[in-house]
Image (cartoon, rainbow, N blue to C red):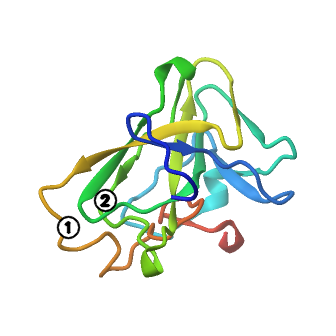
Amino acid sequence: MDGELKLREGLIVHVVLAGAPGAIVGYRAIKNGDVIDVDRPGGYAAADFWEPIRARADKRLILDPDEFYILASREKLQIPSDLAAEMAPIDPAIGEFRVHYAGFFDPGFGHGPEGVPSARAVLEVRSRDVPFLIEDGQPVGRLIFEALAGAADELYGASATSNYQGQGLKLSKHFRDFSES
């Protein structure tokens, strides 16, 4: 994690929306995209399924109701070998949006060289019913940790090629980067 550790029934995760002018800070799913065959990694042009969201000077984003977004955490994470984690809502009272669709983190996720955290959480986000304004650095979720019976025999991404170890903002392995589309 970057900076001071802050816990509130878990580790608070913040969204990053800041970036150089024009930098991609997220993606919005294109409605009614085609069916994806999960057995075809790299088989789809990202532009056929996703619209890039570019950094704005005000570092804000309005989530449109029932749209699906991919964003990233501000924090770089590293899950210890004796823990697993799950992304959970930060607080249902802050509004009707969800950020924890695919929020499981295996032991060793984000383990970088010399023990330095190397991966950001990719956030799958959806607002319900009404538009929802989020700002750079806003708390959007929390990691709830579960102790394992012991340290994992093998850490996530340690021996096999992992599509998500060391990740930043990233679409799933099924999509080619926009530059390759």
Is the residue marked by circle 1 packed among few (<14), some (14-19), or many (20+) residues within 10 Å?
some
> In this rendering, which labeled residue sits more in front, label 1 or label 2?
1
Q: Amino acid at mark 2?
A: Asp
Circle on res. 162: none
Name which quarter of the figure residue 153 lies in: bottom left
Q: Which residue is mark 2?
A: 106
Name which quarter of the figure residue 163 lies in: bottom left
Q: Nearer the viewer, residue 99 or 13?
A: 13
Q: Marks 1 and 2, Cα distance to the nearest angstrom?
A: 9 Å
- Figure check: 13 above or below 46: above
Q: Nearer the viewer, residue 59 or 102?
A: 59
Q: Nearer the viewer, residue 30 or 154?
A: 154
Residue 37, how many percent across, how many down?
41, 58
- Figure check: 149 above or below 165: above
Residue 137, how many percent across, how many down?
67, 43
Residue 170, how many percent across, how many down?
57, 61
Residue 161, how many percent across, how many down?
38, 79
Q: Which residue is mark 1?
A: 152
Going from the N terminus, do you reach mark 1 or mark 2 first? Answer: 2
